[in-house]
Amino acid sequence: LSFPAMAAWQLDAQRSSLFFVSTKKNTVAETHHFDDISGKYEQGQARLAIDLASVETNIDIRNERMQEHLFEVGDFATALVTVEVPEQRVADLAPGDNLILDTTATLSLHGSEKPVDTVLSVTRLADDTIQVANLRPVIINAGDFGLARGVEKLREIAGLPSISPAVPAQFTLYYTKR
Ligand code: OTP
C-alpha cells in the first residue's frame, strides 16, 4: 500500500503582499508594506517569513529609522508567522472553491511570540494555485511585541505629537504547488 504524497506549497512572493498602516498626528494614516516575504505550506503547517529590513514606506530615511529604531533588524532580522491549516481542508477545495477559516496564528516578532487571531479566506484558483487572505482586518499592537519604545523613538526623532501603536495589517498570499 502506498499513500499519495501530500504536496508542498511554495509562496509566490512576487504576487503576494503584506501591508500595514501607521497613523500619526491622530489623523494621518499611511500604508506601508514589506518587499521581501517568503513561505511555504506543508504537512498542515503554513510558515511565513518577513524580512523586516525590506520595509517599504516610500521614504528612505523613514525605512532606515524603522529598521534601526523600531524593528532593530541587527538583532531581529525576520518576523515569523506559523499557522496550522489541515491539509485535507485544502485538498478538498476544487478550483473556484473558497473556505473561511477562523483560526489563530503565532507571530514571532522582535523577540516576542504571541497568538494572533485571524479569519482566513482560502480560495483555490487553479489545481496548483491557492490564495490566502485575511477576511477580517488584523490589528497588531506595538506593545504586544516590545515595539512601543521604538514607536516612541520614531515619534521623538520626527518631532511628532503622536504615533498610534495600533497598526492594522492586510495580507494576500499566493501559493503554488511544487
Ligand atoms: O516628520 P514626518 O511626519 O515626516 O515623520 P515620518 O512619517 O517620516 O516618521 C514617523 C514614522 C511613522 C509615522 C511610522 C511609524 C510606524 C509604525 C507605527 C509601525 C509599527 C509597526 C508594527 C507595530 C508592526 C508591523 C507589522 C509587521 C511586522 C507584520 C506583522 C505580521 C502580520 C500582520 C501577518 C500576520 C499573518 C497571519 C495572522 C496569518 C498568515 C496566514 C498564513 C501564513 C496561512 C497560509 C495558509 C495556507 C493554507 C497556505
Image: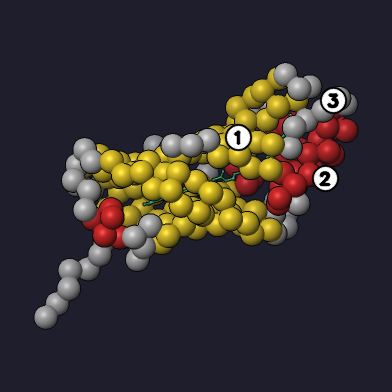
In the rendering, at what x and y percent does residue 112 appear?
A: 68, 58
Query: What residue is at 39 percent from the left and 48 percent from the top?
Result: 101
Query: What residue is at 65 percent from the left and 53 percent from the top?
Result: 109
The quadrant of the rendered image in which ligand 1 is seen is top right
Q: Give the amino acid at mark 1.
A: Pro
Compare marks 2 and 1 and give the one earlier in the sequence: 2
Position of residue 84 in the picture relative to residue 59 (left or right): left
In the rendering, at what x and y percent does residue 91 appear?
A: 23, 55
Dot 1: what SS? Answer: strand
In the rendering, at what x and y percent does residue 87 appear?
A: 30, 60
Query: What residue is at 11 percent from the left and 80 percent from the top?
Result: 1
10 Å neighbourhood of mark 3: few (<14), some, or many (≥20)? few
Q: Relative to 14, is 5 above or below?
A: below
Q: Quadrant of residue 42?
A: bottom left
- Outermost residue toward the front? 102
Dot 2: what SS? Answer: helix
Q: Relative to 173, is 77 above or below?
A: below
Residue 57 versus residue 89: which sits nearer the camera?
A: 89
In front: mark 3 or mark 1? 1
Residue to which mark 1 is pinned: 168
10 Å neighbourhood of mark 1: few (<14), some, or many (≥20)? some
Residue to which mark 2 is pinned: 149
The response on whether ligand 1 sits within 8 Å of label 3 is yes
Q: Quadrant of residue 66?
A: top right
Verify CB contact (< 8 Å) between mark 2 and mark 1. Answer: no
Label 2, label 1: how far apart the Cα atoms are: 18 Å
Q: Give the amino acid at mark 2.
A: Arg
State whether residue 163 appears in this view: yes
